[in-house]
Amino acid sequence: MQTKKKNVLKAYFRWPFYLGIVLAALAVGGLFVDARVGALLMIITGVYFLAAVVNYILYRRSILKKLVDFGAEYAQAQNQMLRQIDLPFAMCNSTGDVFWSNPAFMKAFNLSRKQAAMTSLFPELEAVDLKTTESIHVSFGEKRYVLNLAPIHTESIQEMRELDDADDNMLFNVFLLDETDLLYYRQTLEEERAVMALIYFDNYEEVMSGIEYVRRSLLSALLERKLNKYVSGIKGVVRKLEKDRFFLVMRQEALWELQQNNFSLLEDIKTVNIGNEMAVTISMGIGLGGESFEQNYDYARTAIEMALGRGGDQVVLKNGSDIRYYGGKAKTTERNTRVKARTKAHALRELIEAKESVMIMGHPISDLDCIGAAMGIYRAAKFSDKKVHIVIGDVSSSVKPLLETFRNNSEYEEELFVDRGRALELLDRDTLLVVVDTNRPSYTECPELLKRTNAVVVMDHHRQGRETIENTMLSYVEPYASSASEMVAEVVQYYDDRLKLKSAEADAVFAGIVMDTNNFEDKSGVRTFEAAAYLRRSGADVTRVRKLFRDSMEDHKLRAETVQAAEVFEKDYIISVCPNHGTTSNQTVVAAQAANELLEIRGIKASFVLTEFENKIYISARSIDEVNVQVICEKLGGGGHQSVAGAQLVDNTIEEAMEKLRRVIRGQDM
């Protein structure tokens, strides 16, 4: 550094002589042009050289002295500043040994001498390479600091080289910024942030209709008292919006408390009983992390819709894009009112009639419920005189007989069923896309279709998860329904009184209900049988539907082999693997059938059957009422219902998938 400064000074003093040489050259050139001009230039050049020499001799030492004095004063001022500044500052080497520190550093860390080891003061530095670190958060007692490191290159300083044993001879300036107060106020601000929540009583009308009229006001008062007491305990504010809906504002600190207690209100509210046979359940949608109160409220509204869409009796917390679920283990209750189905049917008709064509899409490897629901929507769209296409990819062998009844029927269009490529060609702005039997965009037959249109309708009976189809014009998701075919059967009834299903279409919808209810044994309610009765009146034939469920000999043998290979796990669960012999393409259905059979074993609370198909591991899960298999499958990336659920695992072997399932079951909160 000093050599560079000397070179700069030498260049500064040499510049006048360089300029004098240029003037001399001009004077010599002037002699050839005009002797008098050249002589004059020579005189001027001589005077300039004389003045430059005198200036160099007289002022050189004075300038150098002033520069040295300035440097000394600057260094002294800098040293004094580092000593007096109220900011801990030190110098250390790459191993953390401190060579020099100012009084503020020594006072902050109670040091009696300047030499110390940074790692002894801040244990966080032991796992850090100082050569590659610019800043790190450290702590000392109750204080919190940001430690900033600035390297000093010491190649030209012999004293520093002798002190620094590192190979690269590096020293570091260490600056410590106290962030204790900043972190405190930041945490306080975080705790004081407003959190919006919407609280709904799930089955208010059903519970009230089951007790005497004179006792309804008492039950309502007890419910509100329980809710108000719970909210006052967290110092929140709750206001009643409707008879069964409430708006809650609380601090984020209170939310953390509720999370630690797993939202005990879900269970506490069920204890309110004055003779009502059905326990009251609530759902709560919480919104936070938004840029404004309005956005938090929108988050809360989205969260409560998801909670209700998943069957209620749970809390959904939406923090920006992050969504968490609490509760949701209670069995969903069937709604006796059909007002919602009628409303959705009228809204669906308006959307269909506003478009030129309708495209219907389900999930990959479409099953009977998916096809049945699609055929019901098909008939509604044809009633409105619209072009209709159903997107179909690979299907199991059990579905092919049903598809052939439509493909070989002259009453149906040649392009009734289209593949993904053709669907992308047919989709335009005047097309309404109806998604049935799934509400996850990644689990649709052709996810690209969802990205190309905002005119989307969703009709599904599975509980909603984190992944949902956004920007839908109409969403009808009811987890209490036994199947998508049941929902479509209700919608078709209210679509128009003149709408009549053809017998083949009624068979398809009826078959979907039969499959998802396991021949009306699972999740069958009053409305399930009412939908079945409507389909029977529309021409559904039980014998024809029964023939659709007949299996091949290979499927029977494979199912028997799967049942035989089953093993009991943790006393209450049974797990098996459906092998892939290549003898059938229907093994996902066989796996589901085997899971149903295994559930018939005494003492078994839940059954799980795994099978490998098309480079994926499919898991079929079944239970009766003691275990919520939907929660288990959600942790594996799947979903479904409390008693019927499933999941798909990619890039996993059967053994790896089995181990993941076992870990989830062991950690399941029963």
Image (spheres, rainbow, N blue to C red):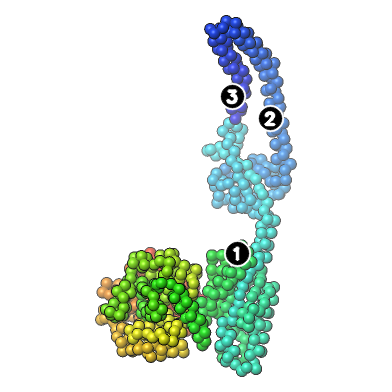
Q: In which quarter of the image is residue 315?
A: bottom right
Furthest residue toward right: 84
SS under mark 1: loop
SS under mark 2: helix
Q: Do the residues labelled 1 and 3 touch (CB within 8 Å)?
A: no
Of tags 1 and 2, which is closer to the observer? 1
Could you tell me residue 642's position as x and y percent? 47, 80
Q: Which residue is drawn at 57% across and 50% down?
A: 126
- The kind of residue on which mark 2 rests is Gly
Q: How far apart are marks 1 and 3 (CA)?
A: 60 Å
Q: Residue 599 carries which label?
A: none
Q: Which of marks 1 and 3 is nearer the N terminus?
A: 3
Badge 2 is on which residue? 71
Furthest residue toward top: 35
Q: Which residue is drawn at 58% across and 76% down?
A: 284
Camera-nearest residue between 23 and 461: 23
Badge 3 is on which residue? 7
Q: Which residue is drawn at 35% across and 88% down?
A: 540
Q: Which mark is residue 290?
A: 1
Could you tell me residue 140's position as x and y percent? 66, 53
Residue 54's place in the image compared with 624, above or below, is: above
Q: Do the residues labelled 1 and 2 touch (CB within 8 Å)?
A: no
